[in-house]
Structures are given as C-alpha cells and as structure tokens.
Image (spheres, grey):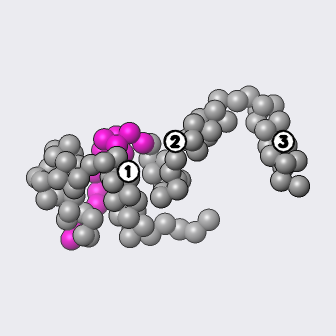
C-alpha cells in the first residue's frame, strides 16, 4: 500500500463532499466557519487541520477509517460488507476467507 499524500486527502474531501451533495458553502457553514472556508481548504490556500477533518467526517457520516480506506472507491455495499465481516466470529471470518479463496481459483 502506498502512502497517501496531502493532495490525495484534499481530493478525498472534495469527493466525499460532492458524494454527500454538499456545496463548499454548505460544508463550511456546517463546520461552523465562514462560507468561503472549504474553498480555501480545497484550493490549498489554508492547511487542513486534523480537527477539521474529523468534524468533516462527522458531518458527512463516515468514519476516519472509511475516509482513508475507501477514498473515491467508497460504496455503501463495501461498507456494509466490511461491517458484517467485522462482526463475524474468527471461525466465521476463516470460512468466508476460505470460500473466497476457493472461488478465486
């Protein structure tokens, strides 16, 4: 897995903001900032703070893990599948892994 760059983080913010159907202005206001705030973040004239990223994820309804893991490949089906796998017992996980390996070959 390659390292994520600052530019990719900013691109993901734009992707998830658009996917949530929020304008730059709406997002800025929901975050409690002036209407131009997100524009300065996405244009990289102001550096993104961790707190802002955490608040952003809360506003659009994703976890920080989803933000970094899925990026522009985010889908609700993927999230649901991961949630289901997370809740399986170790035996259940092993069964699914073996099934997927079998199907692959």
Which mark is drawn over residue 92? Answer: none
Measured in 3D between alpha carbons, the distance from the residue under mark 2 to the one under mark 3, in whole angstroms, is 22 Å
Where is residue 72 shown, x and y percent of the image? 47, 58
Magenta-drawn stretch contains 13: no
- Closest to the observer: 19 or 95? 19
Magenta-drawn stretch contains 46: yes
Where is residue 105 shown, x and y percent of the image? 88, 55
Where is residue 27 shown, x and y percent of the image? 23, 49
Main SS of residues in magenta = helix
Tell me if 88 is positioned left or right of 95 in this view.
Answer: left
Q: How many marks?
A: 3
Q: Residues at badges 2 and 3 in contact (C-beta under 8 Å)?
A: no
Mark 1: few, some, or many residues within 10 Å (few <14, many ≥20)? few
Tell me if 80 is positioned left or right of 101 in this view.
Answer: left
Q: Residue at x 38, y 70 (%)?
A: 7
Q: Which residues are magenta?
A: 45-62
Tell me if 51 is positioned left or right of 61 in this view.
Answer: left
Measured in 3D between alpha carbons, the distance from the residue under mark 3 to the one under mark 1, in whole angstroms, is 33 Å
Which mark is drawn over residue 99? Answer: 3
Q: Residue beneath label 1, please?
A: 19
The secondary element bearing badge 3 is classed as: helix
Q: Earlier in the sequence, mark 3 or mark 1?
A: 1
The secondary element bearing badge 1 is classed as: helix
Q: Residue at x 14, y 50 (%)?
A: 33
Q: Residue beneath label 2, please?
A: 76
Task: Look at the image and tell me whether residue 65 can be seen.
Answer: no
Mark 3: few, some, or many residues within 10 Å (few <14, many ≥20)? few
């Amino acid at each position: 897995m390659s390292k994520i760059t600052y530019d990719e983080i900013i691109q993901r913010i734009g992707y998830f903001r658009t996917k949530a159907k929020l304008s730059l202005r709406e997002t800025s206001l929901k975050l409690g900032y002036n209407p131009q705030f997100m524009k300065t973040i996405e244009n990289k004239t102001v550096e993104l703070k961790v707190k802002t990223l955490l608040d952003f994820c809360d506003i659009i309804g994703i976890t920080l893990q989803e933000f970094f893991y899925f990026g522009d490949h985010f889908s609700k089906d993927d999230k649901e599948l991961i949630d289901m796998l997370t809740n399986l017992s170790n035996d259940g996980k092993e069964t699914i892994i073996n099934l997927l390996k079998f199907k692959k070959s």
